[in-house]
Image (spheres, coloured by chain):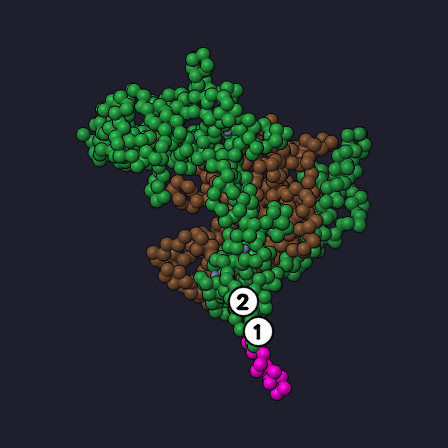
Amino acid sequence: MLRYEGIRYISDKQMVVLDIGSAYTKFGYAGEATPRGIIRTEVKCPESKEIRRIFNYIDIDDLYQLLVEFLHLLFFRHVAISPKDVRIVVLESLLTPTQFRETLAKVLFRHFEVGSLMLLPTHLATISTLGTDTVLVLDVGYQEATLIPVYEGVPILKAWQALPLAACAVHECIKKDLTDSIPNLRIPEKTVEDIKVRTCFVTTLERSAKLGTDDAPSPPPAVKYPGLKTIEIPGYVRERAFEVLWERDNDNLSISTMILDAIVKCPVDTRRQLAENILLIGGTTMAKGFASRLKSELNTLLKSDLYSDKLKIQTFKFHKAPSKPNYTAWLGGAIFGIADLPARCLTKENYLKSNRVPDWVCLLDNQKDDTSNCGI
Amino acid sequence: MAYLFQPDYVRYVCSCGSLKPISKMYFCRHCLKIRCGYCVCHEADSHYCPNCMENLPSAEVRLKKNKCSNCFDCPCCFQTLCTRAGQAPLRPPASSADAKQDVKATPKKVYYLSCSLCRWTSRDAGIPDQYVATGGWPEQENPNSTRISTLIDFHKVLASKEKQEQQRKKFPTKRTFLQYEKFGLTSAMVRKRAGKPLEPKSLIQHSDQPAPAVANEEVDDLPAGIFTEAVDITKITTLEQRLQHPDVQAEKINELRPQHKQFLVKRSQRCRGCEHNVSKPEYSPQSIKFKIQLAAFYHVPEIRIVTCEPLRVGVASELLLKICNPTQHQTQISLLPLDTPTTPTTVTASGEEQELKRENIQMGSESPNLLPLAVRQISVTEDPKPITVVSGAEIALPECPLFLPPRDDAAEYDETNDASHFQDDKKVVVWRKGNKIVVRLHVTPFANEQNKGEPVIVGFVLRHGYVNTLATLEHKAPQKSELNVQLFLTLGNLVGTA
Ligand SMILES: [Zn+2]
Ligand SMILES: [Zn+2]
Ligand SMILES: [Zn+2]
Ligand SMILES: [Zn+2]
């Protein structure tokens, strides 16, 4: 970070940017290039002392208490700020359930008494990191992969895609493979995640096609994984971990078809530009070999019967954001949030009056002066 | 009383519905209400480094990104690193003349960072030793900071344009600037725009616009040796280690760099009903004292379980409770059924009982720690939490009120028995000394199929007299009132049925 940057913003009121993902929460201040930290989205229950994921809430009351506990720790231990009257930017996924959004706003305004809240859709905020306005944003996180194409700054909502193909599914695969090869192995998800991050990778399309056949290539070396008992992670587990993201056996749905299906749903004259402006975000896209596998999958599918007459695209091009993919969305919020647009913020006064959070689509619809754009 | 490693057997119900031991609660002397960590407003008072205890004004804390410039955490195990002194390795003399000089020169002292827990050192990571004990360690900068600065500046310009636009919109003019309108348009509109020539583009071209990012057909391939090379997992970082340093996220252990230690905050607590502080620590990070500490155990009688006979369904068991008056005033206590209303009452000058409300609470003059009137806002209310505890036994409560003398530290050492001053019902009050009594109650557990195996809980309302001394500074007579608090006692498991 450059030295002058701190001085430049010192006079401004601070704005906290939060990206509360289903596995990890990224937090920091608007106008900074790096999040102050990345922590797990979980809390230790004060009564039972067990670790609970926020997104595994039982009901709304449970979620409310989990969020109070989590945000209290986040504000006072990690961000180190009094939340009262502070301005907050929260990145939210397209698939964020309404009850989650409503409960989060209630906790922020009623419990922490924050000054204002700006909810930014992840995919849109992300394009602020590129300085262009036509980007096909694919976010592969923990729970699901989501995609929205953005054309000239406008999201093409009818082309959105979402599939439960993300870290959680990968962890399930590794866990299954490991318990098959080592009987009686009990392995917590945290360890599975660690094994994934440190030893697994996305294999090439050519090798993938041969996996499990007689002609299978020799697997990569096994890895000794230390712990209470050292276990050996077979090479095929390392290589097969991410295959679930690309399998198309039944319904022909994979990470790569998400991109092609989205492009098919976009207007013809936007397609080439979108295919040549793909941005991958989310921690799962950081797996070794992810992008190169995606590229070969896309090129192969394009020639297949499924898409060859529907799509006339020649090439796919990928962007690199000035950040690591697991916090690119946060950075988008940190750049967009600095703009300080009162019209896009929900203030405490307005929230206490209406007691609800307008959906971002209607929120911004309402303030537009042309009415040609309803019917989403 | 709360125990460090035991469950909380006696829990008080806070005004917000939380159940907590009395040691974790506050008592706001201004609202005469119990408050707890959940329902007070926490504020960060000061930031300090937990290692060197340095504290800085908040502007400087912001500038330093809330990190101590002198102390570092180990990048491997996150413990605090120590600075170690060592000798600089002697360079082989270049010539015989130099060699003669070197004999006399004392070897130079150098410093490196070392972790006493996992043995990581800055030398392992290839960080050069320093010649001064503090500071001077190389800082890692985000490689993209220049680009991000440009993008931020650009967005500021866009924002001010949009603000101007909104100003102008108050007068009926045609809207021209659309770039920033990223939200809420539908595909219908996109199609419309896609067909159009790129006319809005020209409007946003100005000098501040950063060069747009260029997408590339080339992507990172798998490392060549991945299918053949053996992996030494001890040389690969864990996700936790990577996330300590988000903009680098190094994959190899030797690429890890020490991280500046994060400041911690000292917090003060403010009552959300009246904005008075209920707890405020001294500013200095070394001090563990408080300027204000309105803990509930200074104001509300404390109840402890002395003994409880084994519990059987339908059989009355004896329960001995110790009650202690922590205040400087004699108080009268009644134990009432759980469904008693908990609204506080006071006796007016004419002698009639009335409900204690905000208007008739005697307030002292505005205390100095209260925020100025102009800053105070409408209080934001949070719905009280529903109480989910269910009473599992019938409790027989004494009908007569119990009197407790004020706390007197000297009387603790007084051997004389003063029980005779009070006309106690010996069946109820079994012991009395100073400001403490022990009372005998009886509990009869219900047969409850649902809570089988769960400990039996009983609840009641503790009504206690409270003398409000806030106004005595102004030579007014202290106001006496009756406050009520709900309590839940966890008595233990059933031993069987009769
Ligand atoms: Zn409370
Ligand atoms: Zn320090
Ligand atoms: Zn260490
Ligand atoms: Zn108060």
Give the answer, above or below, for where B193 lies relative to B346: below
Q: Would you say the residues marked 2 and 1 are in contact, meaning their CB atoms lie under 8 Å apart?
A: no
> How busy is the neighbourhood of tag 1: few (under 14 within 10 Å), some, or many (20 plus)?
few
- Outermost residue to the left: B498
The quadrant of the rendering that contains the C terminus of chain B is top left
Q: Is residue B320 visible?
A: no
Residue at 71 percent of width and 33 percent of height: A368
The quadrant of the rendering that contains the N terminus of chain B is top left
* Percent of width and height locating residue B418: 27, 28
As shown in the figure, which amino acid type bears the numbered disc 2?
Tyr
Residue B102: say if magenta.
Answer: yes
Q: Secondary structure at mark 1?
A: loop
As shown in the figure, which amino acid type bears the numbered disc 1?
Lys
Q: Identify the colour of chain B in the image.
A: green
Which residue carries the number 2 mark?
B112
Q: Could you tell whether A235 is left or right of A256 in the image? A: left
Q: Which chain letter matches label 2? A: B
Residue at 59 percent of width and 68 percent of height: B131
Give the answer, above or below, for where B233 lies relative to B328: below
Q: Nearer the viewer, residue B249 or A313?
A: B249
User: Residues in magenta?
Assistant: B88-105
> How busy is the neighbourhood of tag 2: few (under 14 within 10 Å), some, or many (20 plus)?
many
Q: Identify the colour of chain A in the image.
A: brown
Q: Nearer the viewer, residue B439 or A168?
A: B439
Q: Which chain letter matches label 1? A: B
Q: Nearer the viewer, residue B437 or B153?
A: B437
> How far is the residue under mark 2 from the one under mark 1?
13 Å
Residue B108 — which label? 1
